[in-house]
């Protein structure tokens, strides 16, 4: 399970970095979204990857990560998803306005010469 999650974080982060370095603004936006998904998945995996474990400590069970799942990373990821969605929507509106004003969607405002 840990190997699958770590591979997913690596693939999302590498694809996000590659897209952030692209010349088009929409590709940069998608790259930033992929990077935020990678960070969210990493934070979620920090809280222990227990299957069928209770999120809170039960009476009579030792309070360690072998017996329960930490709820703090889950709440942090949920908050990050909401904030990331709002930021992405705002960034998309700004990019559409910039494209309308400049007539193109190139990052530095100039199209590449053929």
Image (cartoon, rainbow, N blue to C red):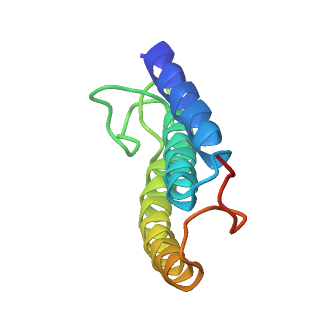
Residue sitting at 43 percent across and 37 percent down?
A: 69
Quadrant in the picture for the N terminus? top left
Q: Report whether 2 appears left or right of 39.
A: left
Q: In this picture, is 46 found above or below 73?
A: above
Instruction: Compare residues 78 and 94 and report the one nearer the observer.
Output: 94
Quadrant position of residue 15: top right
User: Where 78 falls versus 55 (above or below)?
Assistant: below
Image coordinates for residue 105, horizontal then vertical, percent: 55, 65
Depth check: give the residue in front, 60 or 77.
77
Label count reads 0
The residue closer to the viewer here, 12 or 46, is: 12
Locate residue 79, reporting x and y percent.
46, 64
- Please give left or right for residue 60 compared with residue 38 in the image: left
Of all residues, the one furthest to the left in this rendering is 52
Coordinates of residue 4 in the picture (x, y in percent): 44, 17
Residue drawn at point x = 39 percent, y = 26 percent:
50
Depth order, front residue of 10/59: 10
Q: Relative to 11, does residue 111 appear above or below in the rendering?
A: below
Q: Position of residue 110 (x, y in %)?
A: 70, 64
Q: Residue furthest front?
A: 114
Residue at x 53% of width, y 40% of height: 38
């Amino acid at each position: 399970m840990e190997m699958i999650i770590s591979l997913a974080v690596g693939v999302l982060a590498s694809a996000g970095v590659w897209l952030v370095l692209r010349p088009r603004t929409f590709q940069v936006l998608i790259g930033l979204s992929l990077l935020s998904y990678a960070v969210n998945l990493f934070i979620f995996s920090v809280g222990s990857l227990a299957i069928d474990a209770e999120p809170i400590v039960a009476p009579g069970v030792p309070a360690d990560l072998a017996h329960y799942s930490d709820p703090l990373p889950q709440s942090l990821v949920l908050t990050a998803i909401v904030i990331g969605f709002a930021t992405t929507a705002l960034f998309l509106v700004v990019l559409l306005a910039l494209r309308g004003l400049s007539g193109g969607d190139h990052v530095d405002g100039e199209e590449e010469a053929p």
